[in-house]
Amino acid sequence: MRLGRIASPDGVAFVSIEGDGDNQLAREIAEHPFGNPTFTGRTWALPDVRLLAPILASKVICIGKNYAAHAAEMGGEAPKDPVIFLKPSTSIIGPNAPIILPRNSSQVDHEGELAVVIGRPCKDVPAAKAAEVILGYTVANDVTARDHQRHDGQWTRGKGYDTFCPLGPWIETAIDPTDLELVTELDGAVKQRSRTSLLLHDIPKLIEWVSAVMTLLPGDVVLTGTPEGVGPVVAGQTVSVTIEGIGTLSNPAADKKVQ
């Protein structure tokens, strides 16, 4: 099932997205997408509504340097254990929403990633049971003010600006995430190309590691790390991240307006 959130003339709703191409329909879910969702009977043609971020997480947990080639391009060795950090929920935006570039940053980078969406409350999940707590998978862009990250010596400010966590276009619940191609394009030029089979710490390991630290709630998102090829985005450019079997997440970049 493909689960999404839409804005329609009737308001905001969770939906199941059905069909392909121009014939896709958004079928309204009565309450929430967790468990066995029920439906209201209302549907819209997908072109007639606006896709939002497919989930609003209480927290976004990110994994740093989880591809060896990316660790190398950042000038370090791959870590023995997962490195985790947080992005605030206010950094989340949906497809086609603009990434707002801070006026005081000289380098904002794209980082295409596979994201895991949690399906139920959980704590201390063994790797062998990780699949039981996962709702599905979506596409993410861990946008980073690289100059701020370097200056601060930690990652909260550089990773935490509003609009710095695009998610979408929807959550795919029926997919094997172990070997999917990930491609990031900047105005159509390929900047990142890799496969999830190259993750240093696989998804079950990540769920075990993160849930040993903190309780995960339904809708929480775990970003699994970005491959090599990260680089700057400037105003007027569009970043598109495509993950095989899920879809494409595109966002333009824009300068912050002077108030």
Image (cartoon, helix red, strand yellow):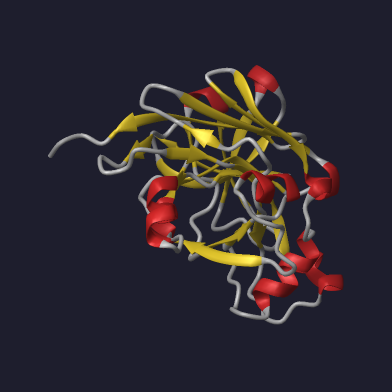
How many numbered circles are shown?
0
**Rendered image quadrant of residue 28:** top right
Residue 42 drawn at (x, y percent): 55, 39
Q: Is residue 12 left or right of residue 114?
A: left
User: Is residue 2 at least partly visible in the picture?
Assistant: yes
Q: Is residue 19 left or right of residue 236?
A: right
**Rendered image quadrant of residue 141:** top right
Q: Is residue 44 left or right of residue 164?
A: right
Residue 25 drawn at (x, y percent): 62, 30
**Which residue, as the protein is rendered here, is positioned at the far left?**
259
Vertical placement of 216 versus 198: above or below?
below
Of residues 164 and 104, the one drawn nearer to the viewer in this rendering? 104
Of residues 115 and 41, the one drawn nearer to the viewer in this rendering? 115
Residue in the image at 64% along x and 43% along y: 73
Quadrant position of the N terminus in the picture: top right
Quadrant position of the C terminus in the picture: top left
